[in-house]
Image: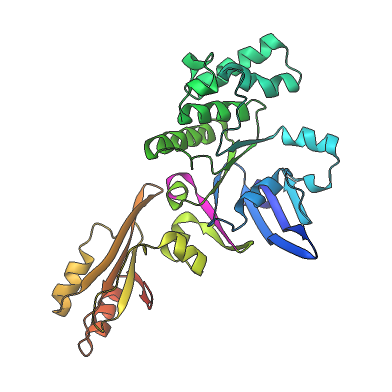
């Protein structure tokens, strides 16, 4: 990718909140990020990491206290309010709680930004109807938000966000309030929009399953900083930071087996998941292992796996097994805390 392919460039971004009495809270500090045109990019972090502040600084709903944000080569942090309003038309946004107008129906919710942009009532309604059809709600134009399910409300919100033909769609925890089946449907809709309209999508989430499902690249935010970024498959295979490991690696409810054996975390990169690696290793080395935890994920159509095993404590057993894994080109790390 070249600099011309970058649609969002974030440079030295910082956001500090003044809590009064000489108390300051740094929500973001020295954030640097490039997001490419036409991709689905994920930003993931635990609660309080700064991810929602970051997405609101991208379109300047929050004014950063340091740094610059560029959209399609234009620095929006230096714009006055009039120019910023025009720039924001190319940046759509959807939220966890939908933010629909409860007193009007689905059609009028989508019409609202169109009328503000100068569309006539007739043209706005025609465009809104087209957008509702695109998100699968052509038969619900007259329904009020109270008559819609959570997934239908989010579809209306997506249609409304697309009303201004945005280049970028910011999704702030857009599926966190939805059930698993509806979440998949909304994520598939966003993939379709990205594929057919070429809209760049930025997914803000605390759920790794969202990143795995639709994102090509990801940035992990922790303690107000971007601590790791890269292709989703690369970050999954080899998380380098504690923050990444907490989000990616299977750990909840895992208790190590009793004994003195060492723990290894095996990572399968999507090309070896169909091989009986552990069984062959046991047969080759002549000693059993204990499986402590296992996890699989689908990323870019490939199955990736993580497996934690406890090696036997016999003299030389662990070394023989690790040598076998090396011979099979299996990525592994030794774990001291599972």
Q: Residue at x 28, y 80 (%)?
A: 323
Toward the bottom, the furthest residue is 315
For the point 20% across and 74% down, which residue is it? 289
- In percent of width and height, residue 234 lies at 46, 60
Residue 193 versus residue 115 in the image, above or below? below
Q: Is residue 335 left or right of residue 172?
A: left
Image: 82 above or below 291: above
Relative image position of residue 115 (x, y in whole percent):
72, 18
State the count of labels. 0
**Residue 74, quarter of picture:** top right
Q: Is residue 214 magenta?
A: yes
Q: Which quarter of the figure has residue 263?
A: bottom left
Residue 271 visible to the viewer: no
| Visible residue check, residue 217 | yes
Point out residue 73 in the picture as x, y percentages from the top left corner: 75, 45
Judge from the rendering whether residue 175 lies leftward or rightward of residue 82; answer left or right: left
Which of the 4 image quadrants contains residue 266?
bottom left
Q: Residue furthest top?
A: 122
The question of residue 61 being in magenta is answered with no
Up-down relation of residue 59 to residue 310 (above or below): above
Residue pictured at 26% horizontal, 68% vertical: 292
User: Measured from the top left, where is residue 52 in percent x and y?
Assistant: 62, 49
**Left or right of 64 on screen, residue 6:** left
Q: Quadrant of the C terminus?
A: bottom left
Q: Over which residues does the magenta segment extend?
A: 212-222
Residue sitting farthest toward the front: 21
Tell me, what colour scheme is on the image?
A: rainbow
Judge whether 291 appears above or below 68 on screen. below
């Amino acid at each position: 990718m070249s600099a011309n392919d970058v649609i969002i460039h974030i440079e030295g971004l910082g956001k500090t909140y003044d809590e009064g009495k000489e108390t300051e809270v740094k929500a973001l500090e020295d954030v640097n990020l490039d997001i490419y045109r036409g991709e689905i990019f994920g930003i993931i972090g635990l609660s309080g990491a700064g991810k929602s502040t970051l997405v609101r600084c991208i379109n300047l709903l929050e004014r950063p206290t340091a740094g610059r944000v560029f959209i399609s080569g234009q620095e929006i942090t230096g714009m006055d309010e009039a120019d910023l309003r025009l720039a924001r038309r190319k940046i759509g946004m959807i939220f966890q709680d939908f933010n629909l107008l409860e007193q009007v129906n689905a059609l009028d919710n989508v019409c609202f930004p169109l009328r503000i942009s100068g569309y006539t009532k007739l043209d706005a309604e025609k465009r809104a109807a087209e957008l509702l059809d695109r998100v699968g709600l052509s038969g619900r134009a007259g329904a009020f938000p109270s008559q819609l399910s959570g997934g239908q409300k989010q579809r209306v919100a997506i249609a409304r966000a697309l009303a201004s033909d945005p280049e970028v769609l910011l999704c702030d925890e857009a599926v966190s309030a939805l059930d698993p089946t509806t979440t998949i449907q909304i994520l598939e809709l966003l993939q379709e929009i990205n594929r057919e309209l070429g809209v760049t999508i930025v997914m803000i989430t605390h759920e790794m399953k969202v990143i795995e499902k639709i994102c090509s690249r990801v940035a992990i935010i922790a303690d107000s900083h971007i601590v790791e970024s890269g292709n989703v498959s690369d970050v999954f295979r080899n998380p380098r930071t504690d923050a990444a490991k907490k989000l990616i690696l299977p750990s909840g409810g895992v208790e190590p087996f009793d004994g003195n054996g060492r723990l290894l975390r095996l990572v399968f990169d999507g090309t070896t998941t169909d091989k009986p690696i552990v069984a062959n290793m046991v047969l080759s080395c002549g000693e059993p292992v204990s499986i402590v935890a296992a996890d699989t994920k689908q990323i870019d159509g490939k199955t990736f796996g993580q497996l934690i095993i406890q090696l036997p404590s016999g003299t030389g057993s662990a070394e023989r097994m690790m040598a076998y894994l090396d011979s099979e080109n299996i990525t592994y790390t030794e774990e001291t805390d599972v």
